[in-house]
Amino acid sequence: QDDGSLERIQFERVMNGSWARGINISPDGRFLILACPDEDGAIISYKINEDGTIALTDKKVCLPGAAYVTFYSAE
């Protein structure tokens, strides 16, 4: 937008009523990753679409105690 203001384009609930503590966007801007420390400690991923909306992927990793999301270079 010309004035730099934000506009909500989507509301998405976290799976199974979990709550997200850590959140990060992948360096390439294609994925939104959440760390949910409740229940079994889930890392949940969403694909970021061209229009800025997100869609849940089928990727979920159980990692007890997960609370933060960071990306590291593999080089």
Image (cartoon, rainbow, N blue to C red):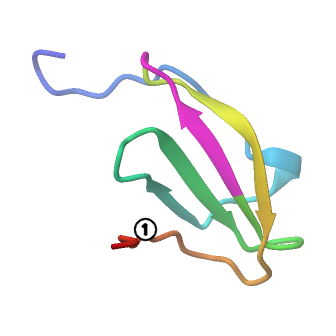
Does residue 9 appear to the left or right of 36 in the view shown? left
Q: Position of residue 50 (x, y in %)?
A: 43, 19
The stretch of residues the image draws in magenta is 44-51
Q: Position of residue 60 (x, y in %)?
A: 78, 55
Horizontally, is 19 left or right of 67 in the view? right
Give residue 43's position: percent from left, percent from top: 70, 62
Give residue 65's position: percent from left, percent from top.
73, 84
**Nearer to us in this view, 4 or 72:** 72
Q: Quadrant of residue 12?
A: top right
Q: Residues within 10 Å of mark 1 (few under 14, many from 20)?
A: few
Element type at mark 1? loop
Please check the rendered image and state whether residue 42 is part of the magenta-colored stretch, yes or no: no
Q: Is residue 3 left or right of residue 70?
A: left
Q: Quadrant of residue 73?
A: bottom left
Relative to 60, residue 51 above or below: above
Q: How many marks?
A: 1
- Judging depth in this view, the residue of 75 and 40 nearest the camera is 75
Residue under pointer 1: 71
Q: Residue at x 46, y 57 (%)?
A: 24
Q: Amino acid at mark 1?
A: Phe
- Kindly indicate the quadrant of the structure image that contains residue 75: bottom left
The dominant secondary structure in magenta is strand
Left or right placement of residue 23 versus residue 59 in this view? left
Farthest residue toward the bottom?
65
On screen, residue 13 above or below 51: below
Residue at left 52%, top 69%? Answer: 69
Quarter occupied by the N terminus: top left
Please give the name of the residue rendered at 62% of the width and 40% of the height, measured from the top-left corner. Answer: 46
